[in-house]
């Protein structure tokens, strides 16, 4: 794994507290040669939750398959769903797609030139709903994932809803859902510097806070100044 990135081409933290990959290379997960993708595991809740980030640095005139964004998946390069700012033939836009078992499906890819330009901040969100199977009659155990984005603090625009295997969220094998960042300059002939300002995983509706409960044990009488220890 350490051969897939060069720390000298990265800024992690620093004064701005961001993650930047300089000169994003051509590696791409669809070809199983992705570079500079970083992830962590999540014990996915049984209620809807959102994975989100804000990205900037995308070229003014992106080329071919350049893209940067976020993904959820099983942790390998053959099973993931991603939402990225993408070139869309040079127009600019977003791409919502997934790969399952090594086969890629482009779910939605609307054009939006407002995402281009290195100073543009684009919010990306993937909302996973473990309570909903969008295709209940297809014989597969799946959960819904809805993609949305916004530029420069504007109103979120929904891109579409897809399905991912419910097994990606299953922690019974000791592994959790992989959540991460991804970028590529596949077939572009040029590179760009990609920056993520954050990467968050949050409940859609946070559970209500509950006061802690402690078992104080049986009632006892103690003398003043005596120390009492609760197990």
Image (tube, rainbow, N blue to C red):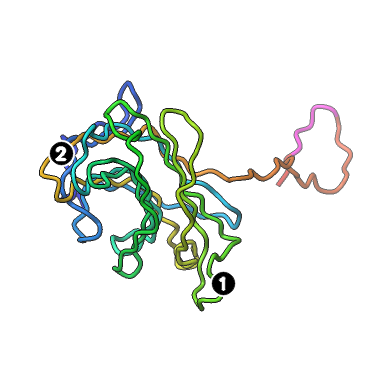
Q: Residue at x 38, y 34 (%)?
A: 122
Magenta span dominant secondary structure: loop
Q: Could you tell which of marks 1 and 2 lies nearer the N-terminus?
A: 1
Query: In this image, 128 relative to 87: left or right?
Result: right
Task: State which quadrant residue 211 falls in.
Answer: top right
Taking depth in this image into account, of 69 and 21 the one nearest to the observer is: 69
The residue singled out by tag 1 in the image is 136
Residue 104 vertical placement versus 8 (above, below): below
Which residues are drawn in magenta? 224-228
Position in image of residue 114 (x %, y %):
35, 33
Crowding at dot 1, Cα within 10 Å, few <14 / some 14-19 / many 20+, comes out as: few
* Distance in Å between CA atoms under marks 1 and 2: 42 Å
Tell me the element at label 1: loop
Residue 117 vertical placement versus 187 (above, below): above
Residue 217 vertical placement versus 107 (above, below): above
The residue singled out by tag 2 in the image is 191
Circle on res. 120: none
Mark 1–mark 2 CB contact (< 8 Å): no
Residue 216 vertical placement versus 108 (above, below): above
Q: Is residue 170 magenta?
A: no
Crowding at dot 2, Cα within 10 Å, few <14 / some 14-19 / many 20+, comes out as: some
Task: State which quadrant residue 216 falls in.
Answer: top right
Position in image of residue 171 (x %, y %):
49, 63
């Amino acid at each position: 794994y350490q051969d897939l990135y060069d720390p000298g081409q990265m800024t992690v933290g620093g004064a701005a507290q961001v993650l930047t990959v300089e000169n994003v290379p051509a590696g791409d997960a669809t070809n199983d040669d992705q570079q500079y993708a970083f992830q962590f595991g999540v014990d996915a809740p049984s209620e809807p939750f959102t994975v989100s980030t804000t990205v900037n640095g995308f070229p003014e005139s992106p080329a071919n398959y350049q893209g940067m964004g976020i993904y959820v998946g099983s942790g390998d390069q053959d099973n993931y769903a991603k939402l990225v700012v993408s070139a869309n033939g040079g127009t600019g836009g977003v791409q919502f797609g997934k790969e399952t078992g090594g086969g890629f499906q482009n779910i939605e890819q609307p054009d939006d030139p407002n995402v281009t330009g290195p100073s543009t901040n684009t919010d990306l969100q993937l909302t996973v709903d473990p309570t909903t199977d969008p295709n209940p009659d297809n014989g597969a155990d799946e959960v819904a994932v809805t993609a949305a984005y916004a530029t420069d603090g504007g109103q979120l625009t929904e891109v579409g809803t897809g399905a991912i295997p419910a097994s990606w969220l299953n922690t019974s094998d000791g592994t959790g859902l992989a959540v991460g960042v991804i970028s590529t300059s596949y077939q572009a002939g040029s590179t760009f510097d990609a920056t993520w300002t954050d990467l968050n995983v949050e409940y859609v509706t946070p559970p209500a806070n509950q006061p802690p409960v402690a078992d104080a044990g049986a009632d006892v009488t103690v003398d003043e100044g005596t120390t009492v220890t609760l197990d």
